[in-house]
Image: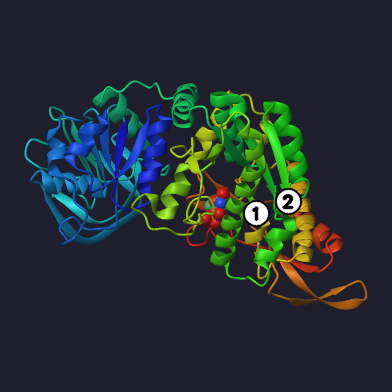
Amino acid sequence: PVLVVDFGAQYAQLIARRVREASVYSEIVHHNVTAEEVQAKNPLAIILSGGPSSVYEEGSPQLDKRILELGIPVLGICYGFQTLANALGGRVDKSGKREYGATELKVKAGGEILAGQPAEQTCWMSHGDQVMEAPAGFEVLASTDITPVAAFANSEKKIYGVQWHPEVKHSEFGQNVLTNFLHNAAGIPATWNSGNVIAEQVEKIRAQVGDARVICGLSGGVDSAVAAALVHKAVGDQLVCVFVNHGLLRQDEAEQVERDYVAATGIRLVTVNVEEKFLTALAGVSDPETKRKIIGREFIRTFEEAQAALYEESKADNRPIKFLVQGTLYPDVVESGGGVTAGIKSHHNVGGLPDDIEFELVEPLRALFKDEVRAIGAELGLPAEIVGRQPFPGPGLGIRIVGEITKERLDLLRKADAIVRAELSAAGLDGEIWQCPVVLLADVRSVGVQGDGRTYGHPIVLRPVSSEDAMTADWTRLPYDLLAKISNRITNEVEGVNRVVLDVTSKPPGTIEWE
Ligand code: XMP
C-alpha cells in the first residue's frame, strides 16, 4: 500500500481517497508508527498529512526519523512538509503571517512532482508556520509571496514536499501533484480497482469465516447491501440476512428491501418486526447520544434473538452462526476515533456496540470509501436503485426527530419525508444532492394560520446537502420553485406541521444530521 501518515487533521482521509482515485491502494496510519512497523507493511510510498500543530512546539507529533532512511519515496504535505524540513535539517519558522485559502503559487522548477504544470497557478493553503530554508541537498521547486519554500525535492532520496494541500479540489493541479508523485517519482502502477477489491475481500472473508454461518443486518442502504453481496459471493448460503424493521424506517422502505434486493441477489432474508420493542426502549428519551446508544444496543439484541431462532436450524449440521456482517465504512471508523482524529458522534455501527457482544464482526468495507463501495456494488450486479441510493443513517428517523420519539411523530415525519423524496426525484435532482435529511422539530411549536383557524404546530426542517464523502458538506441550492412546492405540499398534506424551514449551514460547523 501507500501509507498516509495521519498528523491529526481530517486531511489524511481525503489524501487516502485521492490516492485511490489514482488507482493506488492507500492506508492511513497513526503518526507514532515506527520504522519497523512501516517496514512490516512494505509500502510503495509514504505520504505525510497535514495537521494542526507546530513542528517546533514541545509535544507536537513527530515522525520516526528512521522512516526517512528506508529508501521509500516520501511526500510531505503541509505539516508533513514542515516535519520533513525539520527532520532533515531545514529551517521552519513562525511567519507571523497566515496563508489561508486560495493562494497564488509560483513554480520555479518542475522536478518530478510538478512536471508539466504551469509556472503560475492557484493552490489551497492553510498554515501559520513556514519552511524558510530547504534542507541541504534539496531543490526548491516553488514559492509564494509569503512562503519562500513552498515545495522541495530530493530526487536521489525520492523525498518531496509541498506546503499546500494537493488533496483539496481548490488546488488547481493538486491531483496532478499526487499522480506525479505516485506514478512518476515512486513508479507505482495504477492497478487498484473494484475487481481487485472484490477478489481480495472474497478471499479474506472465506479465510475468516471458514464453514461457519454468517448473519448480516440489512438496513436497505448501500453499505450493508454491498457488504452482504460480497459475503454472499464468498460463502454463499452460509449467509442469512436479517432485516430489522425497527419502526424508524422511511415509507415503503421495508417492502423495497424485501422485493428489490432479494430479487437481485437471491440472498436468504428474514424480516424481524420489532417496532414496539424499539419504541418502548426509546420512550421518554430525547438526548441524541442516548438515542444512538439505545438503538445500537437494540439492534444487536435483535440479532442475538434472530441468531437463537436460526441456531435451532443449524444444529443439525453443527454449524452455529458465529459472525455478523456490518457495512462499516472507512469514514465511520475514522470519525469514531479509529484514526487519530477525535470522535465526533458515536455512529451506531461502531461506537455504540455494547461490550458483551457475542459475534465476531465481518466488515469487508471497513477500508473503503463510499464511492468505492458503489463501484463494487455495481460490479457485483446490484440494481442501480440500490447502488445509487443516498445515504440513510443506521438509527434512521430516530435521529431526525428532535425530541422524544413516538409512533405519531414517526408517522408524521414519514409523510413529510416521502413528499420531499418524491419531489426531489421528480425534479431530477437525486444525482445532484448527497442526501436530504428531513427533520421534525418535535420540541418546537409555532403559531400558524391554516384554513379558518389558528394552529400551533411543529416545523419541518429540510437539510439538502452536497458532499463528496460526508466529511464536509455544503447546503444544496435547491430551486425556489421546488422549495415552494415542497413547502406547500407538506403544510397541506401533513397534519401537525405548519412551517417548513431550510437549513443553510455547511459542514463544518453543522453536521449533516441534526442529532
Ligand atoms: P453527520 O451527521 O455526522 O453524518 O454529518 C455524516 C453521514 O453519516 C450518516 N450518519 C450515520 N450513518 N449510522 C450510520 O450508518 C449512524 O449512526 C449515522 N449518523 C450519521 C449521515 O446520514 C451522513 O450521511
Tell me which colouring the rendered structure shows.
Answer: rainbow
Between discs 1 and 2, the one toward the N terminus: 2
- Give coordinates of residue 321: x percent, y percent: 57, 37
- Give coordinates of residue 50: x percent, y percent: 29, 49
Residue 343: mark in rendering: none
Residue nearest the observer in this picture, 512 or 142 = 512
Residue nearest the observer in this picture, 112 or 104 = 112
- Give coordinates of residue 186: x percent, y percent: 25, 26
Q: Secondary structure at mark 2?
A: loop
Instruction: Residue at 35%, 45% (x, y): give it.
Output: 12
Q: Which residue is mark 2?
A: 250
As drawn, is 198 to the left or to the right of 215?
Answer: left
The CA distance from mark 1 to mark 2 is 8 Å
Residue type, label 2:
Arg
Instruction: Residue at 49%, 35% (x, y): give it.
Output: 364
Q: Quadrant of residue 138?
A: top left
* Quarter of the N terminus within the rendering: top left
- From this view, report whether residue 60 is shown above or below residue 108: below
Q: Quadrant of residue 110?
A: top left
Dots 1 and 2: beta carbons under 8 Å? yes
Q: Residues within 10 Å of mark 2 (few under 14, many from 20)?
A: some
Badge 1 residue CB within 8 Å of ligand 1: no
- From this view, report whether residue 311 is shown above or below residue 229: below
Q: Which residue is mark 1?
A: 396
